[in-house]
Amino acid sequence: MVLNSLDKMIQLQKNAANIGNICVLAHVDHGKATLADCLISSNGIISSRLAGKLRYMDSREDERVRGITMKSSAISLHYAKDTGSSATSLARKHPSSFSD
């Protein structure tokens, strides 16, 4: 879902039930920046054609030059919950894929 309104994003964040935090951790060259780009493109912030190439979260010049992320970054995105499945049911089916 593309949110075109800053006011809409602010309104969603006023309700704590609408906020979920995730952290992406993985070994070097395992797709963290690509995953971040794909999530960002799902909100219409960048084109899906650029996802995986742009490295949107790499804001420092040395990160862009070297092609590696050195500093953590944060962003607020909208996620429309799919009522047909949930992370909880996915975790029950594949418990080794998730960590507490």
Image: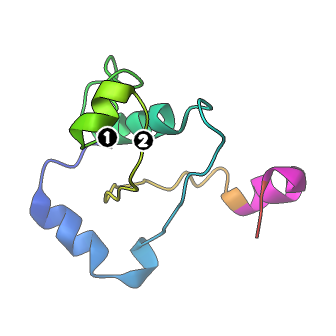
Residue 46 at x, y = what percent? 24, 32
Residue 37 at x, y = what percent? 39, 35
Q: Main secondary structure of the magenta part?
A: helix
Decide: marks 1, 2 in contact (CB < 8 A)? Answer: yes
Q: Is residue 63 left or right of residue 45?
A: right
58 vs 52, nearest the viewer: 58
Q: Is residue 27 left or right of residue 61?
A: right
Which residue is painted at 61% across and 51% down in the image? 25
17 vs 27, nearest the viewer: 27
17 vs 98, nearest the viewer: 98
Colouring method of the image: rainbow
- Tell me which corner region of the image, top left, top right, bottom left or bottom right, holds residue 31: top right
Residue 69 — which label?
2
Numbered range of the magenta stretch: 88-97
Label 1 vs 2, first from the N-terminus:
1
Look at the image and tell me in which quarter the C terminus lies. bottom right
Per the image, label 1 sits on a secondary structure element best described as loop
Mark 1: give few (<14), some (14-19) or many (20+) Cα within 10 Å. Answer: some
Residue 22 at x, y = what percent? 52, 61
Q: Is residue 71 above or below residue 15?
A: above
Q: Is residue 66 left or right of residue 87?
A: left
Q: Which residue has dot 1 on it? A: 58
Could you tell me if residue 45 is visible in this image?
A: no
- Tell me which corner region of the image, top left, top right, bottom left or bottom right, holds residue 27: top right
Identify which amino acid the numbered label 1 is placed on.
Asp
Residue furthest top as drawn:
49
Which residue is painted at 43% across and 41% down in the image? 36
Could you tell me if residue 27 is visible in this image?
A: yes
Mark 2: give few (<14), some (14-19) or many (20+) Cα within 10 Å. Answer: some
Q: Is residue 33 above or below residue 48?
A: below
